[in-house]
Amino acid sequence: MGDVQVREDQQDIINYVKDHFVSWMEEKNIYPFPQKSAEFSPQLLERMVRVEEGIKYQNENLERMMVHMEKRFEEQKLNTDRQFAEVDRRFNDMDRRFNRQGLYQLATFAAIVSSAVAILMQS
C-alpha cells in the first residue's frame, strides 16, 4: 500500500474485497479482457471483429465525407467571392454612372444659370 499506514480494520476490508472481487466481477459478467480472452466463444470473437470492421468502415466513410464537405465549402467560398466581386463591380459602375449624371446635371444647371444671368444683364 506504499507509505500509507493501514489500520487493522482497514486491512480486513482490503482483504475481503480482494478475496471477493473476482467473483463479483463474474456475477456481473464483467471480464477483464486480457485475463479471460481464452474463455470467449468463437462467435463472440467473430462478432467483435465484425464490429471493429464496421467501425473502421464508418471511420473511412466519415473521413471521405469530411474531405467532400471541405471541397464543397471551398467551392461555395469561391462562388461567394465571385458573386461579391460581381456586386462590387456593379456598384462601381453605378457610382461612375451617377457621377457622370451628376456632372451632366451640374453642367446643365450652370448653363441655365449663366443664360439667366446673361438675359438679366441685357435687360
Image: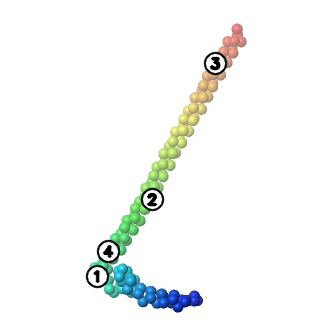
Count how many numbered circles sit on residues in the image: 4
Q: Earlier in the sequence, mark 3 or mark 4?
A: 4
Mark 3 in CB contact with mark 2 (< 8 angstroms): no
- Which residue is label 4 attached to? 50
Q: Which residue is found at the position 30% from the left and 76% from the top? A: 47
Q: Position of residue 44 (x, y in %)?
A: 30, 79
Q: Earlier in the sequence, mark 4 or mark 2?
A: 4
Q: Nearer the viewer, residue 59 or 22?
A: 22
Q: At numbered mark 2, what does the secondary structure look like: helix, strand or loop? A: helix
Rounded to the nearest whole Å, what is the CA distance between mark 3 and mark 2? 62 Å
Q: Position of residue 58 (x, y in %)?
A: 37, 67
- Which residue is label 1 attached to? 42
Q: Earlier in the sequence, mark 3 or mark 2?
A: 2
Q: Quadrant of residue 118?
A: top right
Q: Nearer the viewer, residue 11 or 70?
A: 11
Mark 4 in CB contact with mark 1 (< 8 angstroms): no
Count neighbours of disc 2 (C-alpha within 10 A) and say few if under 14, some if 14 to 19, many if 20 or more. few
In this rendering, which labeled residue sits more in front, label 3 or label 4?
4
Residue type at the position of mark 3 = Ile
Mark 1 in CB contact with mark 2 (< 8 angstroms): no
In this rendering, which labeled residue sits more in front, label 4 or label 1?
1
Rounded to the nearest whole Å, what is the CA distance between mark 3 and mark 4? 91 Å
Is residue 34 shown to the viewer in this render?
A: no
Rounded to the nearest whole Å, what is the CA distance between mark 3 and mark 1? 103 Å
Count neighbours of disc 4 (C-alpha within 10 A) and say few if under 14, some if 14 to 19, many if 20 or more. few
Mark on residue 112?
3
Residue type at the position of mark 2 = Glu
- Which residue is label 2 attached to? 70
Rounded to the nearest whole Å, what is the CA distance between mark 1 and mark 2? 42 Å
